[in-house]
Amino acid sequence: MYQVNYHRASSVEEAAKLASQGDARLLSGGMTLIPAMKTRLAAPSDVVDIARIEALKGVKVSGNTVTIGAATTHHDVAGNAELKSAVPAVADLASHIGDPHVRHRGTIGGSVANNDPAADYPAALLALGATVVTNRREISADDFFMGLFETALEDGEIVTSIRFEKPEKAAYQKFPNPASRYAMTGVFVAKSKDGVRVAVTGAGDNGVFRASEIEAALTKDFSAAAVEGVSVSADGLMSDIHASAEYRANLVKVMAKRAVAKAG
């Protein structure tokens, strides 16, 4: 076992200071970092635990604006009564992440900052036009997700909360891997006064992306039938041991239709 220094931060300011030391990594739920350390894919000099910072926890609904603290667990997102009433699609999404152990430990901020190409939250953020708030600035979801496990975060920058406006209608549907529960393809559909946004996770070679053809069809007619006539190309989609790009292209269409029907 290699040596690592463990720090439990009591504030965002303290965490930022500790994170600037050596080759430090932030720890929230640890769902990705701990396995990476166990397999030596990551070997930080310091681990800065931010999971107990109270300022990073909780869900707040103020009018049409929803704010979720970065250290809020998937379980707490899924069970929050205010969120279930305001944007049930996000609470429902959280309730299907992994298994109970993952949902009780994993956090929304950790998932967003990690930007796994099959994670669920990035699709929600992109479809809702959310804002990622850090200890330094605010970043739109359109600018935040930049590729596989890549985001706009800079060294020492910490995600503190996620903010988005309540949509008129929204829903998420995914085809989960039966073992990991990660999305082999997941589609989040959101309709607001500004139009329709559709985001796809688990299928793209470069991670989460918006499905512009489906958005155009749903802008004209927000119904599952409107998606039927859309042709989804396999170009740029992922092929692996679980599914081919062509199969995922079909899943994008199927999950989009189911999401629209669920959104009502």
Image (cartoon, rainbow, N blue to C red):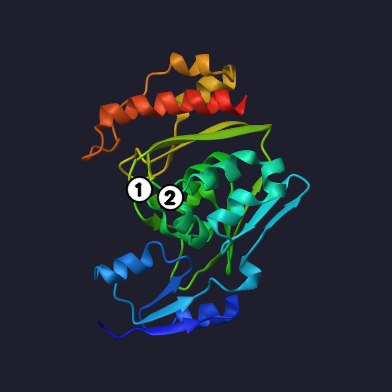
Visible residue check, residue 179: yes
**Residue behind mark 1:** 180
Question: In the shown orientation, is residue 167 left or right of residue 106?
Answer: right
Which residue is more in the foreground, 148 or 119?
Answer: 119
Which residue of the protein is positioned furthest toward the right in this rendering? Answer: 63
- Report the amino acid beneath label 2: Gly
**Mark 2: which secondary structure?**
loop
**Residue behind mark 2:** 98
Q: Choose top left, top right, bottom left or bottom right for residue 32.
A: bottom left
Mark 2 crowdedness (10 Å alpha carbons): few <14, some 14-19, many ≥20: many
Question: In the shown orientation, is residue 163 left or right of residue 94?
Answer: right
Q: Which mark is residue 26?
A: none
Residue 12 image offset from top left, x and y in percent = 58, 75
Mark 2 and mark 1 lie on one chain; the one further toward the N terminus is: 2
Image vertical order of residue 198 relative to residue 163, above or below: above
Q: Choose top left, top right, bottom left or bottom right for residue 182.
A: top left
- Report the amino acid beneath label 1: Ser
Q: Residue at x 71, y 41 (%)?
A: 85
In the rendered view of the protein, which quadrant contains the C terminus? top right
Question: In the shown orientation, is residue 187 left or right of residue 243?
Answer: right
Query: Between marks 2 and 1, how big is the CA–CA gap?
Result: 6 Å
Residue 242 image offset from top left, x and y in percent = 25, 38
Mark 1 crowdedness (10 Å alpha carbons): few <14, some 14-19, many ≥20: few
Which residue is more in the foreground, 242 or 168?
Answer: 242
**Mark 1: which secondary structure?**
loop
Visible residue check, residue 191: no
Q: Residue at x 46, y 78 (%)?
A: 48
Residue 63 image offset from top left, x and y in percent = 78, 47
Image vertical order of residue 123 relative to residue 193, above or below: below
Question: In the shown orientation, is residue 221 left or right of residue 82?
Answer: left
Residues marked 2 and 1 touching at CB (< 8 Å): yes
